[in-house]
Image (cartoon, rainbow, N blue to C red):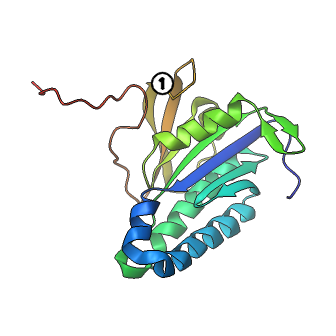
Amino acid sequence: MAELPAGTVTFLFTDIEGSTKLLQRLGAAGYAPVRDTHHRLLRKTSARHGGVEVDTQGDAFFLAFATATGALEAAAAVQRAFAAHPWPDGSPVQVRMGLHTGTPLVTGEGYVGLDVVRAARIAAAGHGGQVLLSQTTRNLVEQALPEGASLRDLGALRLKDLQQSEHLYQLVLASLPADYPPLKTLDWVRHNLPVE
């Protein structure tokens, strides 16, 4: 493992939305090269922006950056790379991403702290193709957004297992989709009651 950034660190969590459905549709032989391409694009692009791979499981990645701007630039570049790639069978790979900046404890096994959990929960709240940022990360990057990018205020929302709401923002990139269903947070409850 490469040396992990210490002090103030920005975390980027990612994972492919609908990967199981994609695997079922393409079969193992068809899905393996898609997953390999996903991994290659994500690793190559994030490394160019200072990203260090902390962990990966299946199609999920946990990356750390010494700067919030580097993490945001990596997320934007990766989403653009995924959108531009000619995926087989016309099946675009939709990756959700979450960014949060904090000061975690660095151990021999990686990072420990609520900032890690917060970043993972932010990513899990999103949809494929969507990049979500915490208020902390937004404050650090708002004056240095990548070209063709803006931030959309999504409000304060409650995330699983966290006591306080988190004010979230969505990275909006020119020429990429910007509208998504409601975030998967504790504020959004599915029900079968009639809507009046």
- Name above or below for residue 109 compared with residue 87: above
Horizontally, residue 111 falls left or right of residue 84, namely: right
Instruction: Give the percent coordinates (x, y) of residue 18.
Output: 42, 58
Q: Residue furthest left?
A: 196
Considering the image in quadrants, where does the N terminus appear? bottom right
Nearer-the-camera pick, 174 or 44: 44
Nearer-the-camera pick, 126 or 140: 126
Horizontally, residue 7 falls left or right of residue 176, namely: right
The part of the image, by quadrant, that contains residue 128 is bottom left
Considering the image in quadrants, where does the C terminus appear? top left
- Name above or below for residue 31 compared with residue 149: below
Nearer-the-camera pick, 12 or 137: 12
Horizontally, residue 162 falls left or right of residue 68, namely: left
Please name the residue shown 69% across and 29% down the image.
Answer: 114
Please name the residue shown 74% across and 49% down the image.
Answer: 64
Please name the residue shown 69% across and 37% down the image.
Answer: 116
Nearer-the-camera pick, 61 or 31: 31
Q: Residue furthest top?
A: 163
Instruction: Give the percent coordinates (x, y) of residue 148.
Output: 49, 56
- 10 Å crowding of disc 1: few (<14), some (14-19), many (20+): many
- Name above or below for residue 5 compared with residue 157: below
- Amino acid carrying label 1: it is Arg
Residue 142 visible, this orientation: no
Labels in figure, total: 1
Instruction: Give the percent coordinates (x, y) of residue 175.
Output: 40, 62
Q: Which residue is mark 1?
A: 158
Q: Secondary structure at mark 1?
A: loop
Please name the residue shown 54% across and 43% down the image.
Answer: 123
Instruction: Give the percent coordinates (x, y) of residue 110.
Output: 82, 44
Residue 17 visible, this orientation: yes
